[in-house]
Structures are given as structure tokens and as C-alpha cells.
Image (spheres, rainbow, N blue to C red):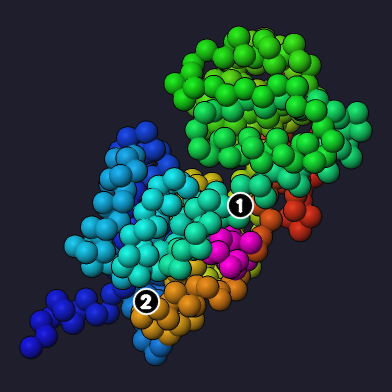
């Protein structure tokens, strides 16, 4: 005898999302939750995910792992064993995604990581893990030929980095790229996660007289450092910051003058334009749906989680079944047009199919410099 609840359950695909809803990463988790929710709402409004000749509604089980990686692993396992989810999304960031990938492998559950950009996450070639971010080194490398073309005297580079996994990975990638381009690293220092006073380090950086300054960290770090740069009248032809300028909050807090001509990069920006085969139909369609629901323009934090869900949906539709092995194979061979950009995975499961946008802040707005297909303007020199 099949109960009504069991019969109904068979018409629902259940996804698991371990998120850091409390703790230090809670702002990122809010964006993630909104990114998932807009997808779920749009898919269910359209009748669900097409599985063979029927449509199945979508449900997402969210679990808070309190910004604690060991708890993220436990949350992922609980979603599979207790919540009985069909598919999984990775916890936030490269470190937690790698730790939780062992759970996906153990239970053979196809899993999509929205924010795992470090190649080390995939270096063991996990069978069930797929990441929608291209590797860290793809973020800023294209800015170097642009900078060398527009600033022929470019020689000296300074790097100032938060002592944390993701910023350090960006720092290492930039250091290698700078050296390959024949540039001199004249300053390369780390700051503590808890650092509030950067004046001493910035004095040393200023004394090195760099042509190009890189600052890596999160929004609050970038804002504090930018303010202290202005206090010291630290100027340079080029200043690149990650990840702060990718978020509207950075421009709101730094002001138009404080953010003018700063360059940055992210895996997606609301300025890019793609037509897509997903439920949104295009980048514009995604932005409109998100704005209608939440009253704000989505940033790359929101979009990253939406596209992770889109990738899994398109793989299920391609497989024509919810059978995990078949969906896993469909992910491995996926070649899809999404609102985020084309999504295709390399042999280790990491996306390699799009060029992350590089941009410059001007008059409080984002101007895309790269890639050529979505370019909105040329590089401007001089940050005061």
C-alpha cells in the first residue's frame, strides 16, 4: 500500500544545501539561499523539472553548518542519510567543498559546488563532484596584457593579501602571472584575518612606489584598506581589489570617489549578456526575476548558486531520469547555455567553458573590460 505522502514524494526531486546560515560566512549564505530560492520558484512555477515524459517539482532542504567546516561535512551526510535528498550542493567555498566531497563520493551522490574555485578541490578527480567556477588563475590573468598595453612603463607590482585560503590562492596566481609577464614584485605581504589597522603595511607599500597594487580579501577588508589608502594619499596608476568591488555594498560604503577606477574580477557580473536554455531564458531574464522577487540586482554571489542549481537541473533533464549514475554521467558531458554563461566541465569536474568578467568601477557603476564579447569600455589609469 503506497501512502498519499509517498506517492506525492515521488513527484518531487529533493536537493540538499548545507549553508553557513550563522557565523562569519552568514552574509554569503544569505546570497546563496536567495540564489537557490529564485531558481526553485521559477522551476516550480513552470511545472517542475522535465524528467522523461513528466515534470517533477523541486524541494530544497537547507541545513545550517554555522560556518564550521567539520559541521558542513556532518550536514552534507545528514542531508543524504536522514533527509534522503536525491542530489546535493556543496557547502560554501573551496575548503568546505573539498571536505564534504568525501561524503558525495561515499554515497555516490551527484554534487555541484557553486563556489569552489581552487583546483585542489578537484585534484583527486572526484567522480561525483562538479564545480561551476573556473580556476582561480583564470580570474585576473587576462588583465595583464591589457595593463601592459595601456601602461607601457608598467614594471612594479605590490600584493597585499588576507591570510586566508581563497585570497592566498588569488595572490599566488597573480604573483606567478606577474613574473611570467616580466614584472617585479616590490611588495608582497599578508595581513591577519582580524587586522583592522593597516597603516604600517600601507606605509611600506607606498614607499615601494608600485605601478600596480593588488589587494585581496573580503568586502570589509577591502573597505578598511581602501579608506586607509586614501588617508595616506596612496595612489597608483592601477589598483585591483578582490572581492569587494564585485559587490554593490563596496561602492555604497566607499563612495563614488573612493571606488573610482578600481579594477576587479568575478565569475559573473550583471553587466554580462547571454541567451540561455535554462528557465530564465537569458541573463536579462534572470536579473528581472531576481529583482522582482528580492528588490535588488543580483551579484555574482547570488548568481553562482543559481547556476549550480541550473546545471543540475539541465543534467537531470538530459538524463531523462533521476537515477544518480545517469545524472552524474549527464553532468560529466554537459554542454549548456545558461544565464551565467556556457557551462561545460573538464576531465576533473571543474568548469572551463567561460571567461570570467574583468571590470572597472566608474561613477559607481561596473564597466566590463573583458571578455571582448561583453566589453563595455577600455581601461582607465589613475586611482587616487
Which corner quadrant of the image does residue 156 belong to?
top right
Q: Residues within 10 Å of mark 2 (few under 14, many from 20)?
A: some
Q: Residues within 10 Å of mark 1 (few under 14, many from 20)?
A: many
- Which residue lies at the image location 14% right of the left edge and 76% below the top edge? 5
- Which residue lies at the image location 39% right of the left edge and 90% below the top edge? 53
Q: Could you say where residue 304 lies in the image, as x and y percent from the top left?
A: 51, 54
Q: Could you say where residue 103 lies in the image, as x and y percent from the top left?
A: 33, 60
Q: Could you say where residue 38 lies in the image, as x and y percent from the top left?
A: 42, 58
Secondary structure beneath dot 2 equals helix
Which region of the structure is painted magenta? 340-352
Task: Determine whether, in the image, residue 117 is placed left or right of residue 14.
Answer: right
The residue closer to the viewer here, 237 or 170, is 170
- Which residue lies at the image location 70% right of the left edge and 43% below the top edge? 140
Real-space Cα distance between discs 2 and 1?
A: 26 Å
For marks 2 and 1, the one nearer the N-term is 1
- Mark drawn on residue 324: 2
| Placement of 53 over or under 266, stated as above or below | below
- Farthest residue in the front direction? 124
Task: Determine whether, in the image, residue 91 is placed left or right of residue 250.
Answer: left
Which corner quadrant of the image does residue 90 belong to?
bottom left
Quadrant location, the C terminus: top right
The residue closer to the viewer here, 111 or 336, is 111
Q: Is residue 363 visible?
A: no
Q: Could you say where residue 77 lies in the image, as x and y percent from the top left?
A: 27, 58
Q: Indicate whether residue 349 is drawn in magenta.
A: yes
**Residue picked out by circle 1:** 135
- Which residue lies at the image location 60% right of the left edge and 66% below the top edge? 346
Q: What kind of secondary structure does the magenta stretch mostly adopt?
A: loop
- Mark drawn on residue 162: none
Amino acid at each position: 500500500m503506497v501512502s498519499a505522502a509517498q506517492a506525492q514524494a515521488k513527484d518531487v526531486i529533493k536537493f540538499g544545501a548545507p549553508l553557513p546560515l550563522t557565523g562569519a560566512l552568514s552574509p554569503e549564505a544569505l546570497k546563496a539561499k536567495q540564489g537557490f530560492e529564485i531558481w526553485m520558484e521559477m522551476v516550480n512555477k513552470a511545472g517542475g523539472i522535465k524528467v522523461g515524459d513528466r515534470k517533477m517539482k523541486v524541494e530544497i532542504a537547507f541545513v545550517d553548518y554555522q560556518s564550521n567546516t567539520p559541521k558542513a561535512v556532518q550536514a552534507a551526510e545528514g542531508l543524504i542519510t536522514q533527509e534522503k535528498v536525491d542530489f546535493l550542493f556543496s557547502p560554501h567555498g573551496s575548503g568546505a567543498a573539498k571536505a564534504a566531497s568525501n561524503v558525495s563520493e561515499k554515497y555516490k551522490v551527484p554534487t555541484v559546488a557553486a563556489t569552489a574555485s581552487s583546483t585542489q578541490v578537484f585534484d583527486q578527480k572526484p567522480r561525483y563532484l562538479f564545480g561551476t567556477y573556473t580556476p582561480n588563475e583564470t580570474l585576473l590573468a587576462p588583465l595583464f596584457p591589457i595593463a601592459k598595453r595601456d601602461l607601457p612603463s608598467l614594471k612594479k607590482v605590490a600584493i597585499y593579501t588576507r591570510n586566508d585560503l581563497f585570497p592566498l590562492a588569488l595572490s599566488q596566481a597573480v604573483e606567478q602571472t606577474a613574473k611570467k609577464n616580466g614584472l617585479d614584485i616590490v611588495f608582497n605581504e599578508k595581513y591577519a584575518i582580524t587586522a583592522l589597522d593597516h597603516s604600517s603595511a600601507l606605509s611600506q607599500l607606498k614607499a615601494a612606489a608600485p605601478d600596480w597594487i593588488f589587494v585581496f580579501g573580503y568586502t570589509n577588508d577591502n573597505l578598511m584598506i581602501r579608506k586607509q589608502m586614501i588617508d595616506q594619499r596612496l595612489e597608483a596608476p592601477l589598483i585591483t581589489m578582490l572581492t569587494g568591488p564585485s559587490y554593490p555594498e563596496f561602492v555604497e560604503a566607499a563612495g563614488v570617489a573612493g571606488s573610482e577606477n578600481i579594477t576587479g574580477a568575478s565569475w559573473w557580473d550583471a553587466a554580462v549578456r547571454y541567451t540561455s536554455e535554462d528557465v530564465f531564458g537569458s541573463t536579462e531574464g534572470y536579473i528581472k526575476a531576481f529583482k522582482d522577487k528580492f528588490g535588488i540586482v543580483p551579484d555574482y554571489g547570488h548568481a553562482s548558486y543559481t547556476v549550480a542549481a541550473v546545471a543540475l537541473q539541465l543534467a537531470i533533464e538530459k538524463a531523462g531520469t533521476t537515477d544518480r549514475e545517469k545524472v552524474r554521467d549527464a553532468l560529466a558531458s554537459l554542454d549548456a547555455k545558461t544565464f551565467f554563461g556556457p557551462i561545460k566541465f573538464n576531465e576533473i569536474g571543474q568548469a572551463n567553458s567561460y571567461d570570467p568578467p574583468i571590470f572597472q568601477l566608474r561613477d559607481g557603476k561596473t564597466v566590463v573590460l573583458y571578455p571582448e564579447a561583453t566589453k563595455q569600455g577600455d581601461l582607465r589609469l589613475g586611482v587616487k
